[in-house]
């Protein structure tokens, strides 16, 4: 069944646009609340948000929707997405909601839903909620309307949880850490957790004003972080995105370290300690072939999934892995969290840095990535990838690579775009193949 509202990571769009309106948020609250009303207990929903201006509007609308169908609401204010997932589970809530558009600009917003176990909802649950959005959800009698309250210590609970994932035998004393919170959801909790663990903290991206989230800061814009690390003589820089479920690192030289290198670092550390489950890690088709070869050299495997952290998590749960993620910095450590957690992943990296007693540029550079290039081709409609000319040029490119590289060509799940990625041992060959495929896709899509 084609889904009308839910995309690869909840419902997302421009605020006051076609989808992300106060009216829609109230309908989502009513529909999701009705879907999770099971049993005779007082039902509860936890609602968190990032720092976008529209968060207040959507929060109020969601509260109205949930309480109208009889759910009590607990509002926790600006907190990372993984904090909302954790609190949903620990507070025995029936559902969790995060209001965020992640790394998107402030004008966008979104609604992510978590079940009572703290995991993102299944496709089947989202489809059922979509059906209810389109229907007239029955309201409860006036005496059964839900109550709403704010929990003031939610940030402290999450800080305590995050610190508990850091080894008791280690401290961050003597380590200067620059933390970039993207003017987003972690602007208070991430610097506080690092300081409490002993780090000398330099915080940037911690002055949200409602419209500056992800604006020139955060994991998708690491240049400011790199400059600050070098200028301040820091040992390492940490960049989170707007809802802090994504992590990018900058070493002491100002060089960016992506999710592939971080996953390799964590997996190697866990394997050395005998705590790596599954004999490897789970990543998407976008992770570099260099990662796969690096793991294989250590006798570790790599399971690849479709793009999207929910697909990574599904494979981890099904196959029994405890490390997984994406090149973009979504890193899932299932021993601790039920979704990507940028701060928790950063703490695992910092632990390895302290153990090694060596510079981040040495500790975190685990392999030389193969040349990789990704380009996007917009199209007006139809299915360009099914055209025989496109299939022909793809087959020819695969034959040319002859096992010495990879092609990943797929439609975007969020916009009318074909993503064309190639990697191989020869940079010029990779560029030529990507351009050749893009040209044919444009031709048939015109």
Image (tube, helix red, strand yellow):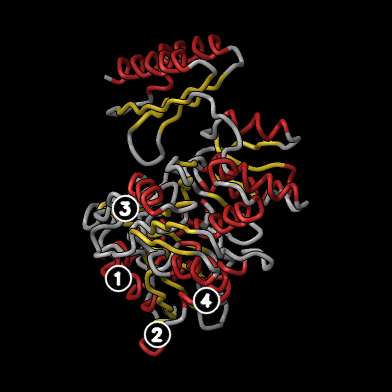
Residue 136 on image: x %, y %: 35, 66
Q: Whole-Å distance between the Cαs marked 2 and 1?
A: 14 Å
State the residue in front, 358 or 250.
358
For the question of whether residue 147 can be seen, the reply is yes
Distance Cα–Cα, label 2 vs label 4: 22 Å
SS at circle 1: helix
Circles 2 and 1: CB atoms closer than 8 Å: no
Q: Nearer the viewer, mark 1 or mark 3?
A: 3
- Say what secondary structure mark 3 lies in: loop
Q: Residue at x 38, y 78 (%)?
A: 67
Name the mark on residue 61: 1
Across and down, in percent, residue 359 comes to: 56, 46
The label number, if any, that marks residue 147 in the structure image: 2
Q: Nearer the viewer, mark 3 or mark 2?
A: 3
The crowding category of the residue bearing disc 2, from other C-alpha atoms within 10 Å (few below 14, some 14 to 19, many at least 20), is: some
Q: Earlier in the sequence, mark 3 or mark 4?
A: 4
Disc 3 target residue: 214
């Amino acid at each position: 069944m084609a889904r009308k509202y839910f995309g690869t990571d909840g419902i997302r769009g421009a605020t006051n646009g076609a989808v992300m309106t106060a009216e829609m948020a109230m309908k989502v609250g009513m529909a999701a609340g009705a879907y999770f009303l099971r049993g005779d207990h007082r039902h509860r929903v936890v609602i968190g948000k990032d720092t976008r201006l529209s968060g207040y509007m959507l929060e109020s609308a969601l509260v109205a929707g949930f309480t109208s169908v009889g759910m009590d609401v607990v509002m926790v204010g600006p907190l990372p997405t993984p904090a909302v997932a954790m609190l949903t589970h620990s507070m025995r809530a029936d559902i969790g909601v995060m209001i965020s558009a992640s790394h998107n600009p402030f004008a966008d917003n979104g609604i992510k839903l978590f079940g009572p176990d703290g995991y993102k909802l299944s496709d089947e649950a989202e489809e059922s909620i979509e059906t209810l959005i389109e229907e007239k959800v029955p309201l409860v009698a006036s005496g059964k309307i839900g109550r709403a309250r704010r929990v003031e210590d939610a940030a402290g609970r999450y800080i305590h949880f995050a610190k508990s994932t850091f080894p008791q035998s280690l401290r961050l004393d003597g380590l200067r850490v620059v933390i970039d919170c993207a003017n987003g959801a972690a602007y208070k909790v991430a610097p506080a957790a690092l300081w409490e663990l002993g780090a000398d903290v330099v915080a940037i991206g911690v002055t949200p004003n409602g419209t500056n989230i992800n604006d020139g800061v955060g994991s998708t814009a690491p240049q400011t972080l790199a400059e600050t690390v070098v200028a301040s003589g820091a040992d390492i820089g940490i960049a989170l995105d707007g809802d802090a479920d994504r992590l990018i690192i900058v070493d002491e030289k100002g060089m960016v370290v992506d999710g592939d290198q971080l996953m390799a670092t964590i997996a190697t550390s866990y394997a050395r300690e005998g705590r790596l489950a599954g004999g490897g890690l789970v990543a998407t088709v976008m992770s570099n072939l260099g990662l796969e070869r690096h793991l294989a050299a250590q006798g570790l495997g790599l399971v690849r999934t479709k793009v999207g952290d929910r697909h990574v998590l599904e494979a981890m749960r099904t196959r029994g892995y405890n490390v997984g993620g994406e090149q973009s910095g979504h890193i899932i450590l299932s021993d601790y969290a039920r979704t990507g957690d940028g701060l928790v992943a950063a703490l695992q990296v910092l632990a390895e840095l302290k153990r090694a007693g060596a510079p981040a540029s040495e500790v975190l550079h685990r392999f030389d990535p193969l040349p990789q290039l990704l380009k996007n081709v917009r199209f007006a409609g139809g299915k360009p990838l099914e055209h025989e000319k496109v299939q022909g040029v793809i087959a020819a490119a695969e034959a040319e690579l002859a096992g010495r590289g990879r092609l990943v060509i797929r439609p975007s799940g969020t916009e009318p775009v074909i993503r064309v990625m190639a990697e191989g041992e020869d940079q010029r060959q990779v560029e030529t193949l990507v351009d050749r495929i893009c040209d044919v896709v444009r031709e048939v899509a015109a």
